[in-house]
Image (cartoon, grey):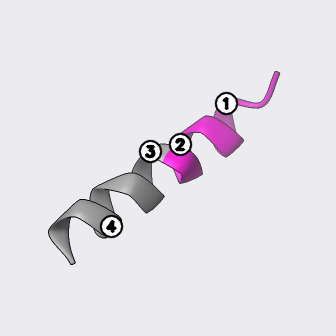
Amino acid sequence: YHDHFEDVWKQHHLLKWLS
């Protein structure tokens, strides 16, 4: 389990929504 991966995944979706 990678916490960093989850953080990146969340950031990616946040940017996707904000874009």
In three-dimensional space, the C-alpha distance between marks 2 and 1, rounded to whole angstroms, equals 6 Å
Q: Please report contact status of discs 2 and 4: CB closer than 8 Å, yes or no.
A: no
Amino acid type indicated by mark 4: Lys
Sequence order check, earlier mark of 1 and 3 = 1
Q: Who is closer to the viewer here, 8 or 17?
A: 17
Q: Circle 3 sits on which residue?
A: 10
| Circle 1 residues within 10 Å: few <14, some 14–19, many ≥20 | few
Amino acid type indicated by mark 3: Lys
Q: Please report contact status of discs 2 and 3: CB closer than 8 Å, yes or no.
A: yes
Q: Who is closer to the viewer here, 3 or 16?
A: 16
Q: Secondary structure at mark 3?
A: helix
Q: Please report contact status of discs 2 and 1: CB closer than 8 Å, yes or no.
A: yes
In three-dimensional space, the C-alpha distance between marks 1 and 3, rounded to whole angstroms, equals 11 Å
In three-dimensional space, the C-alpha distance between marks 2 and 4, rounded to whole angstroms, equals 14 Å
Q: Nearer the viewer, mark 2 or mark 3?
A: 3
Q: Residue at x 53, y 42 (%)?
A: 7
Sequence order check, earlier mark of 1 and 4 = 1
Q: Is residue 15 left or right of residue 19?
A: right
Q: Secondary structure at mark 1?
A: helix
Q: Secondary structure at mark 4?
A: helix
Amino acid type indicated by mark 2: Asp
Q: Nearer the viewer, mark 4 or mark 3?
A: 4
Q: Circle 4 sits on which residue?
A: 16
